[in-house]
Every structure is written in structure tokens, then in C-alpha cells.
Image (cartoon, rainbow, N blue to C red):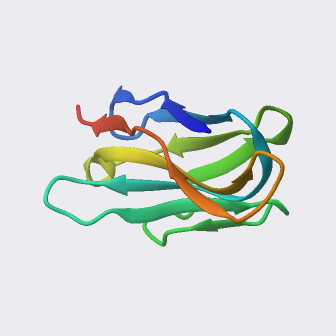
Amino acid sequence: VQLQASGGGLVQPGGSLRLSCAASGSIFSINVMAWYRQAPGKQRELVASITSGGRTNYADSVKGRFTMSRDTAKNTVYLQMDSPTPEDTAVYYCHAVLRAGTGGEWRLYWGQGTQVTVSS
């Protein structure tokens, strides 16, 4: 199983950017997928998550500006980042809790991270 994140880059304050994360491989079921971020000198923090039932959760710092969505047929999630600020600059990581193969235990997976830089 692999998580492939993409869509990072340089964006101006007040602009928009969309991140994508595709889960591939032998996937039995997905419990939750999430975006985390880590800024230089800071701990990794949860940005947003979406459950198998479609329930979303957001960090207070991004509520009203970021939107997480999914395409279940493609095992892909998205993070729409609107009105970003320089404080959103970080490496963004995709995360999933899923069962691979024919089932079995839930396991945690991480993507490779994609850099988002918010600057004018």
C-alpha cells in the first residue's frame, strides 16, 4: 500500500491550492484518511480528517478556509486550501488507517509529504 501526495507548491496569501492523496495497492477497506502538516521547528499536527462515513474534522486554525473531500472510487482525498496565510507554510503529509490485502488488522500509513509555501 502506498499513499501518494501531490499538489504542493508556492501560493500567494489569499490564493488557493488543492492537495491530492491517492492510496494505491491491495486495499481492503479504509477507516479514515487525514492530512497532517509540519512546519520547521514545530511538531506535526492534524489539519483535517475524513472518516469512511464521510464525517470531516478540522483543526481550529483552518476551519472555514480548508475543505477536505474524497473520491471513494479512486481511494483519493483532497484538501482544498483557500485563503492560505504564511502560517500555513509546512510540509503536508497524507495519513490513512486501513486494512490491506484480504482484511486483518488496521494499520497506519503515511505518504511522503508535499511542501506548501505561502508567500507573496
* Towards the viewer: 118 or 44: 44
Front-most of residues 49 and 81:
49
Q: Is residue 2 above or below residue 44?
A: above
Task: Pick the quarter of the image with the C terminus.
Answer: top left
**Camera-nearest residue between 37 and 120:** 37
Residue 118 to residue 30: above or below: above
**Residue 12 figure quarter:** top left
33 to the left or right of 52? left
What percent of the width, then of the height, locates residue 42?
A: 20, 63
Q: Position of residue 111 (x, y in %)?
A: 47, 42
> Residue sitting at 49 percent across and 34 percent down?
16
For the question of whether residue 65 can be seen, the reply is: no
Q: Is residue 74 left or right of residue 107?
A: right
Q: Taking 51 as reference, is 118 left or right? A: left
Name the residue: 29% across, 47% down: 90
Find residue 44 and report its image quarter: bottom left
Residue ID at (29%, 38%): 118
Q: Position of residue 63 (x, y in %)?
A: 54, 64
